[in-house]
Amino acid sequence: MAKVYADHPFQLLPTPTYQQRNGEKPDEFINAATQMACAHNVMLRSLNAIYLQAPHISAEQQHPFLQFTDLWYKGVEHHHRTEDDIFFPILEEMTGEKGIMEVNTEQHDAFLPDLQVFAGYVRRCLAGSAEYDGAELVRLIDTFAPALREHLADEIPTFLELNKWGERLKGFHARFALEAKKTELELGILAGAVFLMATHDVEYEGGIHNNFPPIPAPIVWGLRNVAWWAHSDWWAFAPCDRAGKMRPLDVPVLET
């Protein structure tokens, strides 16, 4: 019997750090692209978990599952809004190149309408004005997920190619981190921060990203051992356990 994990159907991204040659020291652009790839894999891993479990949700599980699904949407929306409103303008300012990330912004616009239809359905189900249907949720995901996955993959080499700007972008990653701190609690400690703990695989690519997200160890401990329990029913549908390791999803196992 083969257990089912959230590593498909939407393929996870290899990180630039992992793809480097042995002994090669990552520069600022590789580090930034790797952080971005880890964030994108959080989205893909949790979307996989939603997609695979949606047809098997019981009536008792619907509310916490939909809360987890709605939080996924909020995280994706927050990520892309932060890029469009903060990160991309920083790059334009530092390079002096207007529209430097225009292709990425256009990709956001391409999948956003279908993503919002999906979010609307989830929220109507939560409000009780629509009846939950796992097959319908999967159908709605299929309308935007291929374009979303393509965008998440395309953005990584785009960040790597920023190295052509050299000294003009010196320190850009630190500016990203500083500005991101101003919005990082928008999704809440008991929701958004714990969501990251439940959806980042600390063993991915041999465990080289076990310090993602870059949060002090005492805070990580508190998130995993205290804050986790506030919405533990939501995290029952997450791809990772409380230790950040991938776990089998609660779906019928496959015959081998």
Image (cartoon, rainbow, N blue to C red):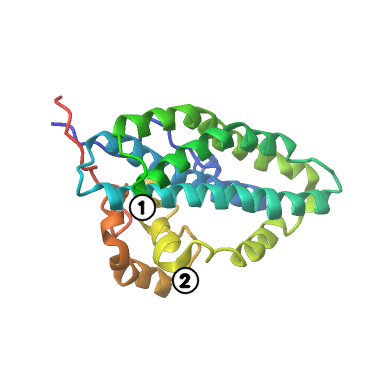
Q: Which mark is residue 201?
A: none
The x and y percentages for residue 102 are 74, 37
Q: Name the quadrant of the N terminus.
A: top left
- Whether residue 26 is visible to the viewer of this picture, yes or no, is no
Please give the name of the residue rendered at 80% of the width and 49% of the height, measured from the top-left corner.
92
The amino acid at mark 1 is: Gln
Please give the name of the residue rendered at 53% of the width and 46% of the height, measured from the top-left corner.
17
Q: What is the tally of numbered marks visible in this picture?
A: 2
The amino acid at mark 2 is: Pro
- Residue farthest top in this picture: 256
Q: Name the quadrant of the C terminus.
A: top left
Estimate how packed mark 1 is, as few (under 14), some (14 to 19) or many (20 or more) residues with alpha carbons within 10 Å: some
Please give the name of the residue rendered at 44% of the width and 48% of the height, measured from the top-left corner.
72
Please give the name of the residue rendered at 47% of the width and 57% of the height, measured from the top-left corner.
212
Residue 175 vs residue 137: left or right? Answer: right
Estimate how packed mark 2 is, as few (under 14), some (14 to 19) or many (20 or more) residues with alpha carbons within 10 Å: few
The x and y percentages for residue 42 are 44, 47
Residue 59 figure quarter: top left
- Whether residue 250 is visible to the viewer of this picture, yes or no, is yes
Q: Which mark is residue 67?
A: 1
Residue 198 vs residue 3: left or right? Answer: right
The x and y percentages for residue 175 are 70, 62
Residue 3 vs residue 177: left or right? Answer: left
Viewer-side label of 2, 1: 1
The x and y percentages for residue 73 are 47, 47
Marks 2 and 1 sit apart, C-alpha to C-alpha, by: 27 Å
Q: Quick one: SS at disc 1?
A: helix
Residue bearing mark 2: 216
